[in-house]
Image (tube, grey):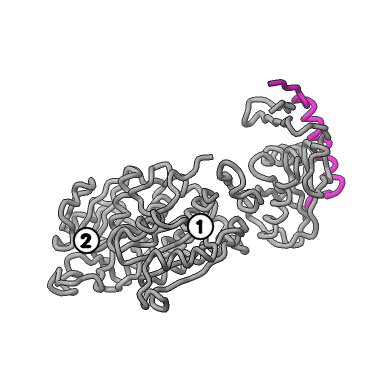
Amino acid sequence: MSELSVNHLLGIKYLKEKDIQLIFETADHFKEVINRSIKKVPSLRDITIANIFFENSTRTKLSFELAEKRLSADVINFSAGQSSVKKGETLIDTVNNILSMKVDMVVMRHPNPGAGIFLSKHVKAAIVNAGDGAHEHPTQALLDSFSIREKLGDVAGKNVVIVGDILHSRVALSNIFALKLQGANVKVCGPKTLIPKHIESLGVEVETNLKKALNWCDVANMLRIQNERLDISYFPTTREYTQQFGVNKTLLDNLDKEIVIMHPGPINRGVEITSDVADSKQSIILNQVENGVAIRMAVIYLLASKIK
Amino acid sequence: MGQKVLLSSKEINIILHRLACQLLENHLDFANTVLIGIQPRGTFVVERLTKILKEEYGVKNIQLGLLDITFYRDDFRRGEKPLEATETKMDFLVEDKKVVLIDDVLYTGRSIRAALTAIQSFGRPSEIELLTLIDRRFSRHLPIQPNYRGRQVDAINNEKVEVMWEEKDGKDIIYLKNK
């Protein structure tokens, strides 16, 4: 059987197309497992995984923890807020201390871009990046593509628009890499202030008119305005943002075709999408959450099988 | 590489009919029995047996499942390559049912051990039986024996039993090969 070409999941940028297909095929099997009445398999009985979160997270952390437990791995959790990091310990020291307790894999979220890559060069454990600053969030992009594949049959050739704060979004960057790798066409849409310069060099087009973008696409991935990362004012008011870049039911009903609506969560209802859109049958937001567990099980299973 | 034919197409057919009759003897109308093929190679055996039971012995409503045991195996990370999963198709629970596990070759018994664990995810069966087409004697690592066996063979460790099916390989034949 083929195996992953990497020993860590640091970003989609480091994956090959066949890695993504292998992860999806494995996730198909795990999706069947998590829909049984007994949702657990004993594969990773001898693996210990540390979830190290230097940044807040609910969904991703729960999803990873559930995936690990469904595979029967031992799990330890660590949040920077309650730790010796506050006493001045460095990242490598923190992680090496945890690894001395015989941990095989580290799932890490960190506010600094490249933290996972840095760690993978200095510690002996498989690293899974659960989000590093505005850099990458690979498992989110994988579960997004997996959800598109599930809904539309294939990712190749589909038109996907990513709407919102592209500048601060690791979800956007990982999604762009993943979608392009699988042969999808990608546009980004949002206020010009929130679209990075030179984004076209990644092979995506910029569209500032939401209606045009929605008429073009098969799938719209709506991102949250990350108020916590907006250090300066990028648009006049939230209300004005919603008027120009928010999706509502009227807008969707006036399109030529029915498109699929995605959102990585957490949703700011009434800002980037209205409640009736988020809860409509066009939305696959909750499927994304379910698929997140299957995808993370697949990633952890495939990486664990490479630990010798 | 030396090889000899262990069973021809005709012999396989006769054996499958005998096994079907033995199952019939113990389970009659299969009302409370489920046949579960162990993926990937047990699938062919279970499908053939079901066909014979339905078409030649008029048994209706046989419940059929396919069980993948990859995630239950005890050699994860011990082999050279990662274990490849296949599809599990179990659209029923086995609670209080009689289960017949079906595979092509019984060798070390480890696959069956994994299948016994895997089946627990679908409930608590009232009993579990084992049917294998080929039983390799003297090579068991675990105390596991079949209730129904097609043919017992004495094969040494550097020999390999290879089962070919018409659906997949073009014709039914079983070889004993040197590895």
* Left or right of A86 in this view: B98: right
- Amino acid type, residue under disc 1 in the picture: Met
Q: In front: B122, or B24?
A: B122
Badge 1 is on which residue?
A: A297
Q: What residue is pinned by disc 2?
A: A167
- Asked if the magenta segment contains residue B24, the reply would be yes
Magenta residues, dominant SS class? helix
Residue B159 sits in quarter: top right
Image vertical order of residue B137 relative to residue A38, above or below: above
Q: Is residue A224 left or right of residue A286?
A: left
Determine the secondary structure under disc 2.
loop
Whether residue B61 can be seen here: no
Disc tally is 2
Q: Which residues are magenta?
A: B1-30
Residue at point 65% right, 44% down?
A: B39
Residue at x 49% of width, y 63% of height: A99
Q: Position of residue B101 (x, y in %)?
A: 74, 48
**Chain for mark 2?**
A
Q: Residues within 10 Å of mark 1 (few under 14, many from 20)?
A: many
Q: In the image shown, does B122 or A3 lie closer to the viewer? A: A3
* Above or below, comparing residue A4 to residue B6 in the picture: below
Residue A274 colored in magenta in the image: no
Q: Quadrant of residue A280?
A: bottom left
Which numbered marker is on residue A44?
none
Q: Position of residue B138 (x, y in %)?
A: 83, 39
